[in-house]
Image (spheres, rainbow, N blue to C red):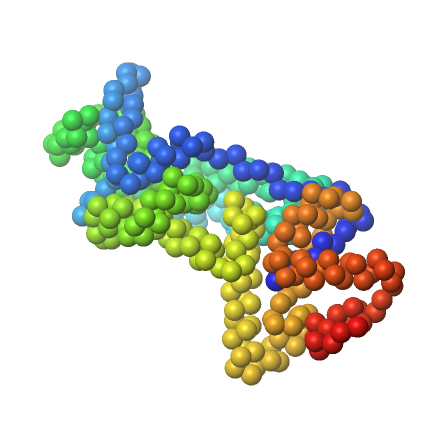
Amino acid sequence: MRVVPHWDRKGKGGLLTAHKGMNSEQVEQKIRQILFGKAITDISDQSGYEQIFIIRSLTGKEDALVLYAHQKALQEGRKNGLITQAELKREFKQRGLWTDREEAELESYKQEISRLKNALPDFKFQKAKWHQINNRLKRVQEDLANLEKIRRELFMPALEYRAQEIKFRKIAFFCLETIDENSFWTSQSFDDWEDFIFVNNVVDAYARVFMVNEPTIREIVRSGQWRFRWLGTKNGADLFGKPACEWSDAQNALIYWSLYYDMVFDDPDCPHELINDDDHLDRWMRRQRKERELRKDVYKGRKSKAKDRNKFAHGTEEIFVFTDRGDKEAIAEIQGMNDPATRARLRTERKVLEEKGKVREWDLRKSLYLGAKD
């Protein structure tokens, strides 16, 4: 792959801002929590009194019981005639509280967020445009969050929300242990428990520890603390001490993204400068897949699919990246994306241009296609 800096005369561009993630201690703590499936935490009751507890991930059987309780709540709710989201939606539409316009607005926000996220990597080397898009992205995300909050509050009485509440209560029952690693509740004591604030705090603690979002999981997987463990075993059963059917969602995510980054690091054109940039790295991975498919098509003789591609010899693709004129830092980073052979060829071409001042592209690059020499 060949990446060529291309100046944008209209704007002042720039680099992506650094991701402010966890520090080394926080990464290690999160790894241990996911590996062992347990975390020690303080949980307060309705009076504000805090006690030390253990929150643990659920077993495969417990996950199945949580799913069963959720599905049963839905079935019984329908049988008993509880109002559903669809029924509430029709009522709200008639009253003008929540209409197709709000639903369309929700979908529009989601589509714009996706579009803006995909656009950000294209302006990595154009500061003004990148910040403009990023600021717009934050505003749209905030608008989406506000609209979703209104929707949640309106549809709270719906059957689906009640079933979700039963699901979370079941998670709280299973996940909470005393500091001596004994179950905090019995079935009877849980049924009789009246401190709903405490139960909500247990669910919040479980979500905080074990419901890990994708950016956090990817940051963990990239860390040295995780890589040495992964490279030392590459076996989830050894890492987690249990078969795959018992892995938690966070543990499954660790394995998935570890395999993903293995593919990146094992690629001969591994873009080390993009490893910490999730959006740009995903874009690179998609492009690599397309290039592999293209090479496969060419190999099979279906060259027509590639006739409009601007290709160099040996399947190398020329990609233009816009940046600001005179931004030496950005130009150096872009040039660093090329492999050593391409950088050497660019130096040779630049030398020819400096010597001759003006030259036809064919004369400059004919040796690349024909093996000819000046």
In the image, residue 108 lies at what x, y percent?
57, 50
What is the total number of numbered labels drawn onto the structure image? Answer: 0
Residue 194 sits in quarter: top left
Q: Residue at x 30, y 36 (%)?
A: 33
> Which residue is the extreme one toward the front?
373
Q: Where the N terminus falls, by quadrant?
A: bottom right
Q: Tell which residue pokes out farthest to the right in this image.
A: 357
| Residue 261 rendering spot, x and y as whole percentages | 44, 52
Q: Residue at x 21, y 35 (%)?
A: 173
Q: Nearer the viewer, residue 42 or 329?
A: 329
Residue 68 seen = no
Image location of residue 231, percent across then percent down: 35, 49
Is 245 positioned to the left or the right of 210 in the image? left
Nearest to the observer: residue 33 or residue 149? 33
Residue at x 57%, y 48% (from the top left corner): 273
Q: Position of residue 142 (x, y in %)?
A: 55, 37
Q: Does residue 194 sit above or below 132 in this rendering?
A: above
**Quadrant of the frame with the C terminus:** bottom right
42 and 231: which is toward the camera: 231
Image quadrant of residue 156? top left
Specify whether residue 4 is in view.
yes
Q: Residue at x 23, y 42 (%)?
A: 58
Q: Is residue 47 left or right of residue 87?
A: left
Along the line of sight, the residue nearer the viewer: 235 or 349 = 349
Q: Quadrant of the rendered structure where residue 4 is?
A: bottom right
